[in-house]
Amino acid sequence: MYLNKIKIKFVDFWPGFNPTTDPVFGTFLQEHYEIEYQHVNPDVIIFSVFGNTHKIYAKKNIIKIFYTPENFLLHHYPALDGMLGWENVDRYSHGSITSFERIGSSNHRMPCYVRRFGFDLYDRIENNLPKTIQKKNFVYMQSACVEFRDIMVQELMEKFKIDCVGRCLNNTNINVKDKLEFIKDYNFVISFENSSTAGYSTEKLTDGFVSNTIPVYFGDPNVGKDFYDSSFVNYHSFDKKEEIYDRLNDLIKDDGKKLHMLQSTKIKNKDLFNGDLFLKFIKNIIK
């Protein structure tokens, strides 16, 4: 039974975004609401950061929800008038869905990997597929080059053989069509974010889990609150780079330790994958 019938319009999203087929805004919400998408007279506006269309709709006249997978605490976006932080999020919306935790506010924390793949990503991460050791160790796949990230990877390349198959630091002639299928043939995937901010993490970490590959992760310094350190190599758990290199060398030499890491429980913060909590947030905003 549907909770209600609602008319929702999505604006200021990235090109190609389709709310009707989105795992969360489409598939999941349609299980609970009868939804008319992109209605000319919407009840709810859900807006992202890539434009100013949402400003046509006054907050006093319509329910507005801000959604972004981006790091708006560090990068400037037009939807928020180029301002960093929460001030204009609060100014323009009744509630927000972001990667960040914000206690005592109408913000629901949803890292981009949950929105992108849906709440059943939990089962794909904690899968029962056979865990095997591969012949190749490290792979790095990145198309958006960021200087500090490239430098970090180059430092690793001085210690280990790394196949760089994306646009950044490419040292192969390999054309990758399916990232998840490709990286499963490696023991480790370099999973570095484009910035380091508490709470901000992307699918770079979870892609490794889904592919039964050990992520070597840098980005969210609080990632250990969401995932067990025993399931990946977390840069933020080490004081010195040499300690990271020693840990990687130890894993490379010991198939048993790699296998134990692959087989270990990954998810610590199960609330991230709890659709009921998201639905409760939506109910509280749309009432």
Image (cartoon, rainbow, N blue to C red):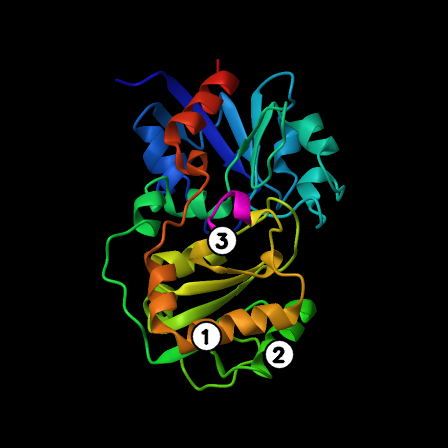
Query: Where is residue 125 drawn, in percent x and y?
Result: 35, 51
Which circle, 3 or 2, is nearer the viewer? Answer: 3
Read off the magenta span.
Answer: 224-228
Residue at 52% x, 69% y: name it. 247
Task: Rate crowding at label 1 as few (under 14), some (14 to 19) or many (20 or more) other CA atoms within 10 Å.
Answer: many
Task: Rate crowding at label 2 as few (under 14), some (14 to 19) or many (20 or more) other CA atoms within 10 Å.
Answer: some
The kind of residue tagged 3 is Asp
Is 144 displayed left or right of 29 in the figure? Answer: right
Task: Rate crowding at label 3 as few (under 14), some (14 to 19) or many (20 or more) other CA atoms within 10 Å.
Answer: many
Is 255 displayed left or right of 238 in the figure? Answer: left
Q: CA distance from mark 3 to mark 1?
A: 20 Å
Q: Which of the two labelled residues, at mark 2 and mark 1, occupies the earlier sequence position?
A: 1
Q: Is residue 1 depicted above or below 195 in this figure?
A: above
* Secondary structure beneath label 2: helix
Work out whether residue 25 or residue 241 is closer to the camera in this orientation and state it: 241
Q: Main secondary structure of the magenta part?
A: loop
Q: Which of the two labelled residues, at mark 3 and mark 2, occupies the earlier sequence position?
A: 2
What label does residue 229 carry, if any?
A: 3
The kind of residue tagged 2 is Gln
The kind of residue tagged 1 is Val
Work out whether residue 246 or residue 32 is closer to the camera in this orientation and state it: 246
* Secondary structure beneath label 3: helix
Is there a contact, CB below 8 Å, between mark 3 and mark 2?
no
Residue at 70% x, 44% y: name it. 73
Query: Where is residue 194 drawn, in percent x and y?
Result: 62, 60
Q: Which of the two labelled residues, at mark 3 and mark 1, occupies the earlier sequence position?
A: 1
Residue for badge 1: 139
* Secondary structure beneath label 1: strand
Q: Is residue 225 magenta?
A: yes
Residue for badge 2: 154
Q: Is residue 235 depicted above or below 246 in this figure?
A: above
Residue at 43% x, 56% y: name it. 231
